Every structure is written in structure tokens, then in C-alpha cells.
Image (spheres, rainbow, N blue to C red):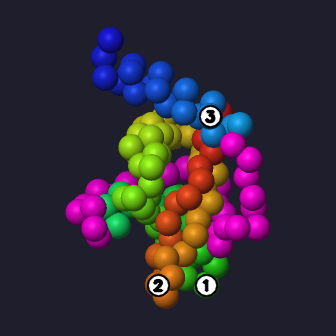
Amino acid sequence: MTILKQLIIISFFVLGLFTIVPQNSQAWEGVFTGKIGRIDVTEKSNFGFRVFPVGAGPLCGTGTENWGYVHQDLVNYNIMVSTLQLAFVAQKEVGFHFTRLSGTPYCSIGYISVGR
């Protein structure tokens, strides 16, 4: 089985898990739905995996950044990153929920939902 097929199978399993996790919309500082226009990857300690949703303005309300990052300490970091990569390649819409890193304009992606 190719790596791409394995990634697709794992991602669909993960997406199924995301649909059963309850969502508390009041806990998020920013919500945006759209396709991913660009992904940047850099050093882990420097917001290592960044996602730029198409047409997004400031993602955490009063911030200035139009990108969100996946925090390196998330337990499901690898699953979140692989799901976002799959959504980017497949050009699927993603529902993003963000929280702001305290004292900064930077938004951490805390919850995603990939549409059809």
C-alpha cells in the first residue's frame, strides 16, 4: 500500500473521530471556514507548521496574522498536521477554531473539521 493511500485511510479514520468530539464554540477566539491556500513548515519552536486559509483576515479577532499554527505540544500533532496536509492537497474546505497565544497576535489551531 502506498504512503498516500495509508495517509488517506488514516485521515478518514481521524475525521470520523473529529465528528464525535463535542465542540464548545464559546472557548475559541477565532473561527474561520475555507480552503488552505498555503502551508509553511519551519523549525518546531518557531510556529513550525503554519496554515494560511484562503481569504482569511486576522484569525483571532483583534490579531494581525492571517495564519494559524499547530502547536508542537498537541498530543495529536501528527494527526492534525497530516489531516491539514490532506485537506490542502484535496482542496477541501476546513473549519478552523483558534485560540490566541497569550500576549501575541498568533493563533493556535485547536480544532478542525474537514468538509466534503
Q: Relative to 62, is 30 above or below?
A: above
Residue 110 position in % (x across, y down)? 56, 58
CA gap between label 2 and label 1 equals 10 Å
Q: Relative to 72, is 84 above or below?
A: above
Q: Earlier in the sequence, mark 2 or mark 1?
A: 1
Say whether residue 25 is visible: yes
Q: Quadrant of the N terminus?
A: top left
Residue 104 numbered tag: 2
Residue stretch rendered in magenta on the structure: 21-46
For the residues carrying marks 2 and 3, which lies nearer the camera in this image?
3
Looking at the image, residue 34 sits to the left or right of residue 88; the answer is right
Q: Are marks 3 and 1 in contact (CB under 8 Å)?
A: no
Mark 3 falls on what kind of element? helix
Q: Is 33 one of the magenta-colored residues?
A: yes
Give the residue at x 49% y 88%: 103
How many C-alpha atoms fall within 10 Å of the one at disc 2: few (<14), some, or many (≥20)?
A: few
Q: Are marks 2 and 3 in contact (CB under 8 Å)?
A: no
From the viewer's side, name the closer residue of 5 and 35.
Answer: 5
Residue 17 numbered tag: 3
How many C-alpha atoms fall within 10 Å of the one at disc 3: few (<14), some, or many (≥20)?
A: few
The amino acid at mark 1 is Thr
CA gap between label 2 and label 3 equals 31 Å
